[in-house]
Amino acid sequence: MRRRALSFLASVFGCAAVAATPASALPKARPGEVGFSAERLKRLDDHMQTMVDRGQIAGAVTLLARHGRVVHAKAFGRRALRGGRMPLDAIFRIRSETKPITGVAMMILYERGLWKLDDPISKYVPEFANLRVVTGLDAEGQPILAPVSRPPTMRELMTHTAGFAYGLADDPRSPADQAYYRAGVLRSASLNDLVQKVSDLPMFAEPGQLWRYSVAADIQGYIVEKLSGESLPVFMQEHIFAPLGMRDTAFYVPEQKIGRLAALYDADPATGKLIPAVEPAWRDVTRPPAAPLGGGGLVSTARDFARFAQMLLNKGELHGARILKPETVALMTQNHLPAGFVVTTNGTAGVLNPSQRPFPFAAGMGYGLDMAVAVDPAASGAPVGPGTVSWGGSAGTWFWIDPVNDLFFVGMIQRLGGVGPGLDAQSRTLVYQALERPPLVAAPLARSPAKIATAKTASTR
C-alpha cells in the first residue's frame, strides 16, 4: 500500500511531492583553507561572465568544492534573456547527467543481489531474447537484419557497449538510429512501451564490439522499475533524493517552482546568437513525463547535484545517509572498457547534431558504469587526477569528480549542445590553475577492467 501511495503521489505531483529528509547544507570554506588561490579562482568568474557578456549563454551557475567544503558557488547572467537575474538555486535540465543517477539506482539493486554485471540483459528483459543487428542495406536501401551472435550483458548495458542505438535524430548514416527516431523510442507512452519498441528495432552493432552512445540508461530505468516494484521517480526519490536532501531534483518542475526554471536556448545557425529552443512536447519539463527517462529526464540544481557528487566522493555516503557501499562506488567508477574502445562524446557536445562526425572525446578516457573515467589524464593533457569521473547533458550542464584531488565541480547553463566541446575543458583549466596544494601525482589507471588499479588518494592537508 505504501508503494502504491508513493507511486500515486509521484504521478500526480512529481517527485517533489514526496517529503525529503531534512539535510544540512555542505559547509563552506575560504579558498585558501583548502588549497586554492582566491585571486586565481576569480579567473573562472571572469570567464563565465565573459560568456554572458558575449551573448554565448544567458546565464550560468557554477559550484566547486574540496575536502567536503564549498569553495566557490556563483550565479552569472540571467535566468532568461529578458528575465530576472540567475539565482543560485535555479533549476536546470540536466539531461544526460541523469545517467549517473540512474546508475546509482541500478547499483542499489545490485547490492540487494537482484542482478549481476555479466548476466544477459534478457534475464531481466525477456523481450530482448531475439535482438537483431543491421548487417547492410538491400537494393532498395532497407536495412538487412540478422540475429545478434550473443545476448548483450548488463555490464555492456551500463557501459554503452551493448550495441543499442539512441534515435536522438533522424541520422541518415545510421539505419538503427533512423529506426529508433521514426519509431519514437524516446517519445514512448511508458518505459514498458519503450522496451517493447526497442525489442523490435535493429541494433546498431553486435554486443561488445564498440562504444556507442545509446538508449541504455533508459532501459536501465525500466529494469529499476521491474526489479523494485516502484516507478523510477518514486525509487529515486525514496532511495537517493530524499536521503541526500536533493529537494529540487525530479522528472519535472512543479508549478510552484517554475519561476526558478532556467530558460533553454539554441544558437541561430546564421548569426550564432541565442534564440529560444524549440523542442518537442515530450521534452516539456513543466509536466510529468509519460515515460521518465533514466537517460536524460531529470531537472536539478547545482546545490542538489553537488550533494550527489559529494556522496560519490565520500564513497557512497553523505551526512550519515549511506546510499552505496564503498566497494560498489569503486566498481562504478573504474574503467570497464576493453583496450581500443573509444568514447565519442562527453554527454554534451556532439550528441544532438548527426551531421557532426563522432570524435574521440579525449585520449586516455575510459568509461565506468554510466559515467566517463579519466584513465590516463596526461594522454589528453587534462589536469585532473586519474580516476576522475565526469559527464554532461545536452542542454549544457557538466560535472567532474576528482578523488585524487578530493574535489568536484558542477557547471550549469541552458544552451543546446553547450558551447562546443570546450567549456568543460576551459573550466577545468581555470579550476586547476588555482589549485596551489595538489596531492602527489598518482599513476595512470589500467585500461583493462581485469587489471584495474585503484588510485591512492594522497593527504593534502
Image (spheres, rainbow, N blue to C red):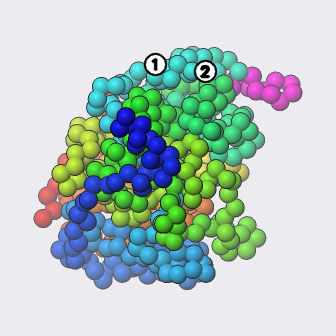
Structural distance between the alpha carbons of marks 1 and 2: 13 Å
Q: Relative to 285, does residue 201 appear above or below in the rendering?
A: above
The answer to which image quadrant residue 146 occupies is top right
The answer to which image quadrant residue 404 occupies is bottom left
User: Depth check: 23 or 88 in front?
Assistant: 23
- Could you tell whether 354 is left or right of 328 in the image? right
- Pointer 1 with pointer 2, Cβ within 8 A: no
What residue sits 49% from the left and 70% below the top?
260
> To which residue does mark 1 refer?
123
What residue sits 22% from the left and 77% below the top?
30
User: Depth check: 247 or 215 in front?
Assistant: 247
Residue 237 belongs to magenta span: no
In this view, which residue lies farthest toward the right?
A: 140
**In the image, residue 184 lies at what x, y percent?**
69, 40
**In the image, residue 177 lies at what x, y percent?**
68, 38
Q: In the rendered image, is residue 100 in sight?
A: no
Label 1: how many Cα within 10 Å (few below 14, some 14–19, many 20+): some
Q: In which quarter of the image is the C terminus?
A: bottom left
Q: Residue 148 carries which label?
A: none
Q: Relative to 114, does residue 292 appear above or below in the rendering?
A: below
Mark in front: 1 vs 2? 1
- Could you tell whether 458 is left or right of 207 in the image? left
What residue sits 28% from the left and 32% below the top?
111
The stretch of residues the image draws in magenta is 134-144
User: Depth check: 263 or 74 in front?
Assistant: 263
Label 2: how many Cα within 10 Å (few below 14, some 14–19, many 20+): many
**In the image, residue 407 lies at what x, y percent?**
28, 61
> To which residue does mark 2 refer?
131
Q: Is mark 2 on a helix, strand or loop?
A: loop
Q: In the rendered image, is residue 115 in sight?
A: yes
User: Which residue type does callout 2 highlight?
Assistant: Leu
User: Which residue type does callout 1 highlight?
Assistant: Lys
